[in-house]
């Protein structure tokens, strides 16, 4: 009888993602204080040695997992938003872009919970804080461009409004995680602010 060959090991990129996803699950469910190398290895179904092979230390792992999550979120957001780029009303694209920050499905709920756990840890972790506190503001810059395309009222400062919209919608997303508000209520609040800053004529 022919001897069965062992299954090949996952590619390094697949193994790294497997471990990063374990970090996400721990962060969303228990917070990053529970994310020791041993806990992460157990959650990922691998040995601590495998985790240490793919990541130089815990800090490298946490930052890498955060970077992977950012890329994953950006990819999913582009898939949802790209079909709207040719919408007749540019407000549709602006609204949809802002709604990407809300936990409107399971993936976005988990992602926001992970980001909240990371942000909480960054308050006492300078290395993680550096990931959040960078000089560039790509999301705010994108919203500025969308506000300009949608037609702001003459008295509106698009940059200031973009700052408020991004920060505000993120806070409202946290309220949704806590079930403090309903999706309908958050959408009404978003529409209120869009109507406030945009001209009456689309």
Image (cartoon, grey):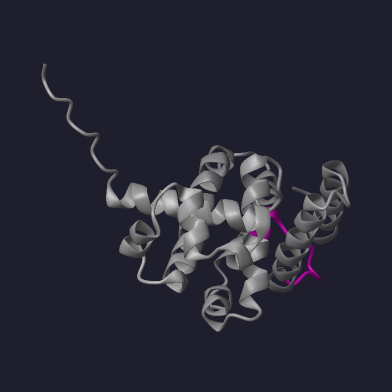
Residue sitting at the far top:
1
Viewer-proximal residue, 81 or 48? 48
Magenta span contains residue 149 = yes
- Location of residue 88 with respect to 129 vertically, above or below: above
Residue ID at (56%, 83%): 126
Viewer-proximal residue, 150 or 95? 95
Range of magenta residues: 147-157
Q: Position of residue 195 (x, y in %)?
A: 84, 54
Residue ID at (71%, 42%): 104
Dominant secondary structure, magenta: loop
Q: Position of residue 138 (x, y in %)?
A: 55, 67
For the question of whether residue 144 can be seen, the reply is: no
For the question of whether residue 131 can be seen, the reply is: yes
Residue sitting at the far front:
1
Residue ID at (61%, 63%): 34
Residue sitting at the far left:
2
């Amino acid at each position: 009888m022919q001897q069965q060959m062992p299954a090949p090991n996952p590619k390094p990129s697949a193994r790294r993602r497997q471990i990063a996803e374990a970090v996400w699950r721990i962060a969303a469910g228990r917070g990053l204080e529970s994310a020791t190398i041993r806990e992460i290895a157990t959650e990922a179904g691998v040995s601590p040695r495998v985790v240490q092979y793919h990541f130089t230390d815990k800090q490298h792992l946490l930052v890498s997992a955060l970077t992977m999550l950012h890329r994953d979120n950006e990819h999913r957001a582009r898939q949802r938003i790209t079909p709207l780029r040719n919408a007749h009303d540019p407000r549709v694209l602006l609204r949809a872009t802002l709604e990407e920050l809300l936990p409107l499905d399971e993936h976005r709920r988990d992602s926001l919970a992970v980001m909240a756990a990371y942000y909480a840890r960054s308050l006492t972790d300078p290395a993680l804080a550096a990931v959040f506190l960078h000089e560039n503001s790509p999301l705010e810059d994108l919203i500025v461009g969308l506000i300009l395309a949608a037609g702001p009222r003459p008295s509106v400062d698009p940059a200031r409004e973009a700052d408020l919209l991004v920060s505000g919608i993120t806070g409202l997303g946290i309220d949704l995680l806590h079930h403090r508000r309903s999706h309908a209520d958050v959408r009404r609040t978003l529409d209120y602010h869009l109507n406030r800053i945009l001209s009456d004529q689309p």
